[in-house]
Amino acid sequence: INKILSREKIDFEHFSVFTKEIRSNFNTADFQLFLKFYSLKAQERYSYCHVIGEQSHYTYSRAIIDFILTEIKKNPQKTIEHLKKKTKK
């Protein structure tokens, strides 16, 4: 996702509560936030659950990347902040 954001010159950023700085990279926590907010693990179009014994592991499709990028493009500086506010309610 970071490579595509850079290549397409999308000015993605948000304020990190932990570092007290503005971040411009998309990380695992951001990905997990998208998964939770949009319930993406439950949608077959975006993910597949591999179950081996009692352990499960998810594989994600290219469609999930496209979806996340589309959402970020709508408001690159406020996307993460918006998702965080909505998931805390």
Image: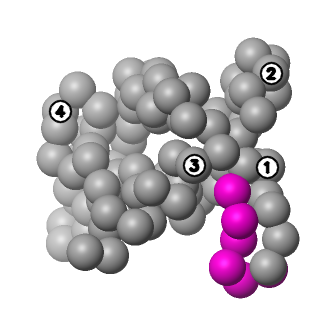
Q: Which residue is mark 3?
A: 78
The stretch in magenta equals: 14-19
Looking at this view, is 77 or 5 the one in front?
A: 77
Is residue 18 covered in magenta?
Answer: yes
Q: Which callout, 3 or 4, points to the residue nearer the camera?
A: 3
User: Callout 3: few (<14), some (14-19), or many (20+) C-alpha neighbours within 10 Å?
Assistant: some
The correct choice, above or below, for 27 with respect to 69 in the image is below
Instruction: Give coordinates of residue 63: x percent, y percent.
Output: 39, 22
User: Callout 4: few (<14), some (14-19), or many (20+) C-alpha neighbours within 10 Å?
Assistant: few
Hey, what amino acid is under mark 1? Ser
Q: Which residue is mark 4?
A: 44
Hey, what amino acid is under mark 2? Lys
Q: Which residue is mark 1?
A: 24
Q: CA distance from mark 2 to mark 1?
A: 12 Å
Hey, what amino acid is under mark 4? Glu
Q: Which callout, 3 or 2, points to the residue nearer the camera?
A: 3
Looking at this view, is 26 or 49 the one in front?
A: 26
Question: Residue 2's image quarter?
Answer: top right
Measuring 80% from the left and 21% from the top, which residue is drawn there? 9
**Is 67 on the left-hand or right-hand side of 24?**
left
Question: Residue 22's image quarter?
Answer: bottom right
Hey, what amino acid is under mark 3? Lys
**Does residue 77 appear anywhere in the picture?**
yes
Residue 9, which numbered label?
2
The correct choice, above or below, for 4 with respect to 22 in the image is above
Measuring 17% from the left and 38% from the top, which residue is drawn there? 43
Q: Secondary structure at mark 2?
A: loop
